[in-house]
Image (cartoon, helix red, strand yellow):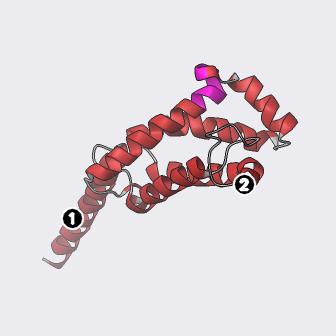
């Protein structure tokens, strides 16, 4: 269990976590709350299930993953799980929508949609966080230290009992 939460005090992971979390939060807020010109929960669910023909559960998990997952990522809570979720979401977005548009975003308005360069960046940043953890000032780091402390206390208690039994 400690492995899920283990991290170091890296500033770079803190920066990755916050920047990625803020960017994904904006997209999640569009889908969940209708902020920043988004369609909100019912509009996004309608688009995902009606137009894209995604199963209801997948559509729901994408919306929740981007909105609540981004907040968890900023806090450094369940960083590896959230990063893995973002990788799955972005691979799904590429496969279902963005691959036919090619690599580049629609900078000049000549494509029907957006390419997958943004999604590739999210995948790369998420992969780095999945490998290394949340870094400095993460809730995961606090949890890992707490788990490690409990394991150390239990080990010391066992040794103490063994010592008393021998003595």
Q: Residue at x 52, y 33 (%)?
A: 25
Residue at far left of view: 167
Q: According to the image, label 2 marks what residue?
A: 99
Q: Which residues are magenta?
A: 28-36
Residue sitting nearer the eye, 164 or 143? 143
The answer to whether residue 70 is magenta is no
| Displayed quadrant of residue 109 | top right
Q: According to the image, label 1 marks what residue?
A: 156
Question: Does 15 sit above or below residue 1?
Answer: above
Q: Where is residue 121 shown, x and y percent of the image?
A: 52, 52
**The C terminus appears in which quarter of the rendering?**
bottom left
Dominant SS in magenta: helix
Of badges 2 and 1, nearer the viewer stands 2
Q: Residue at x 67, y 41 (%)?
A: 62
Q: Is disc 1 placed on a helix, strand or loop? A: helix
| Sequence-earlier tag: 2 or 1 | 2
Q: Is residue 135 visible?
A: no
Q: Where is residue 136 shown, x and y percent of the image?
A: 28, 48
Question: Does 99 sit above or below residue 35?
Answer: below
Q: Residue at x 33, y 57 (%)?
A: 7
Residue sitting nearer the eye, 160 or 122? 122
Task: Report whether 30 appears left or right of 130.
Answer: right
Q: Residue at x 39, y 38 (%)?
A: 75
């Amino acid at each position: 269990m400690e492995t899920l939460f283990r991290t170091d005090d890296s500033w770079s992971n803190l920066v990755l976590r916050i920047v990625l979390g803020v960017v994904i939060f904006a997209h999640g807020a569009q889908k969940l709350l209708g902020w920043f010109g988004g369609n909100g929960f019912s509009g996004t669910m309608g688009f995902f299930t009606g137009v894209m023909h995604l199963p209801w559960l997948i559509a729901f998990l994408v919306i929740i993953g981007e909105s609540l997952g981004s907040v968890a990522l900023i806090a450094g809570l369940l960083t590896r799980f959230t990063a893995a979720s973002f990788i799955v979401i972005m691979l799904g977005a590429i496969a279902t929508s963005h691959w036919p548009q090619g690599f580049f975003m629609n900078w000049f308005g000549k494509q029907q949609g957006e390419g997958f360069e943004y999604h590739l960046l999210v995948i790369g940043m998420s992969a780095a966080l999945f490998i290394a953890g949340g870094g400095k000032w993460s809730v995961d780091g606090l949890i890992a230290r707490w788990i490690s402390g409990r394991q150390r206390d239990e080990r010391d208690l066992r040794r103490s009992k063994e010592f008393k039994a021998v003595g």
